[in-house]
Image (cartoon, helix red, strand yellow):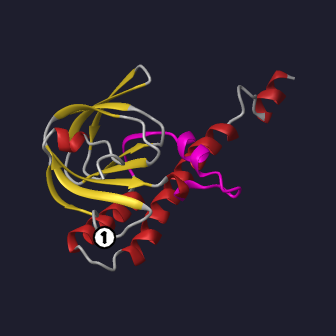
């Protein structure tokens, strides 16, 4: 599975508690682990990555597209790396995490264009979202249980995670679009007249 994941955690000797390897999941791959401090590159993949911080707060520095983004991330914080995006990450202390790799086809639009939509989503650098945190913890419980029938109920969970990321992106985009650029209020217009 390391070809389909970033392999950063294996390179820096994370302590894996459980993974979805061998559980027959088709729409996602997940791992539950304790990460040691590291500096590494999450290279561009065809899948999206969600990392749920199960501990914290912790300091993490992200570097993406020439920008350095330092964050103090609380327990429950989310890192999201869309498909075809690269990011350098420096984790400054130990952290318990769940990594969930989401297949690009989970992000398909009404025309069935999954790849394009999965690459256009915005990254998330440690913000909290209770919905994503609960869904991520549910995935963690499933891989801890190591149930052979888990693929039956994992697909709806990862589908809900993908839809939540779409909703968060749409919400952020529509709020920015809804704000008119430097438009006067009706009261200001009356005052000017």
Task: Mark yes or no: residue 92 visible.
Answer: no
Residue 23, horizontal then vertical, whole percent: 30, 70
Numbered range of the magenta stretch:
106-128
For label 1, the residue is: 23
Residue 174: give x, y in percent of width and height.
64, 44
Answer with left or right where residue 112 lies relative to residue 96.
right
What percent of the width, then of the height, locates residue 17? 15, 60
Q: Residue drawn at (28%, 71%), measured in percent from left and top?
A: 142
Q: In this view, does 123 lie above or below 25?
A: above
Query: Taking 192 as reference, is 96 above or below it?
Result: below
| Residue plotted at (18% across, 54% down) | 33
Secondary structure at numbered mark 1: loop
Position of residue 92 in the picture relative to residue 115 (left or right):
left
Residue 128, percent across and down?
Answer: 36, 49
Residue 112 is covered by the magenta coloring: yes
Q: Where, by quadrant of the figure, is residue 175 drawn? A: top right
Which of these two is toward me, 146 or 164? 146
- Name the side, left or right, on which 32 lies relative to 65: left
Q: Horizontal placement of 125 versus 38: left or right?
A: right
């Amino acid at each position: 599975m390391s070809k389909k994941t970033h392999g950063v955690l294996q390179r820096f000797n994370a302590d894996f508690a459980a993974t979805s390897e061998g559980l027959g999941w088709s729409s996602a791959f997940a791992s539950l682990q304790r990460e040691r401090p590291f500096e590494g590159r999450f290279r561009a993949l065809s899948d999206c990555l969600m990392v749920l911080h199960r501990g914290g707060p912790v300091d993490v520095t992200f570097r993406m597209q020439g920008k350095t983004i330092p964050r103090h991330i609380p327990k429950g914080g989310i890192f999201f790396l869309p498909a075809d995006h690269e990011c350098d990450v420096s984790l400054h202390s130990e952290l318990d995490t769940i990594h969930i790799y989401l297949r690009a086809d989970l992000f398909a639009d009404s025309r069935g264009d999954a790849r394009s939509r999965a690459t256009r989503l915005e990254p998330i650098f440690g913000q909290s979202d209770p919905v994503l945190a609960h869904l991520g913890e549910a995935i963690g419980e499933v891989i801890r249980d190591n149930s052979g029938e888990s693929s039956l109920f994992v697909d709806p969970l990862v589908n809900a995670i993908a839809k939540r990321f779409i909703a968060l992106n749409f919400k952020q985009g529509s709020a920015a679009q809804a704000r008119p650029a430097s438009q006067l209020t009706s009261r200001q217009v009356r005052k000017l007249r």
